[in-house]
Amino acid sequence: MKSSEIRWNDEARGKILDDADRVLREAVVDLAGSGAMTSDEAFAALTGTLKDKFIDWEPGPDLRTYADAIANGDVETDEA
């Protein structure tokens, strides 16, 4: 077996991505329900919450999008 052939199967890969989405969603919703803050404060709080939950963490542009939504009050905090 070549080392390039070692990878998660499609089912495991899907679960990993679903789990990562859930962690992100929970962090955004929890922060959105915690009170008013600026986009920069939300970005810093999200980064602080998520950095230890992922291997090789680097905040990307998606995180800024969610921070802006939190600051603007655009995140629905209840499950519909």
Image (cartoon, grey):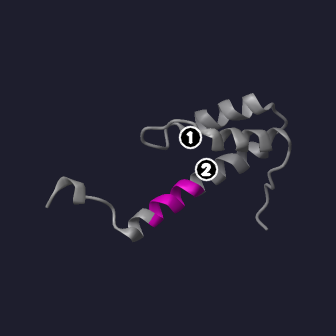
**Element marked by disc 1:** helix
Q: Residue 33: which disc?
A: none
Left or right: where 57 falls relative to 10 = right
Q: Are marks 1 and 2 in contact (CB under 8 Å)?
A: yes
Magenta region includes residue 25:
no
Residue 17: x, y in percent? 50, 59
**Element marked by disc 2:** helix
The Cα–Cα distance between marks 1 and 2, rounded to whole angstroms, is 7 Å
Given residues 12 and 31, the one toward you in this image is 12
Q: Where does the magenta region start and end?
A: 14-21
Residue drawn at (39%, 66%) of the image? 12
Magenta region includes residue 16:
yes
Given residues 49 and 14, the one toward you in this image is 14
Numbered marks: total: 2
Q: Residue 24: which disc?
A: 2
**Which residue type does callout 1 highlight?**
Leu
Left or right: where 43 falls relative to 20 = right
Residue drawn at (73%, 28%) of the image? 40
Residue 24: x, y in percent? 61, 50
Q: Which residue is mark 1?
A: 50
Q: Give the quadrant of residue 5.
A: bottom left
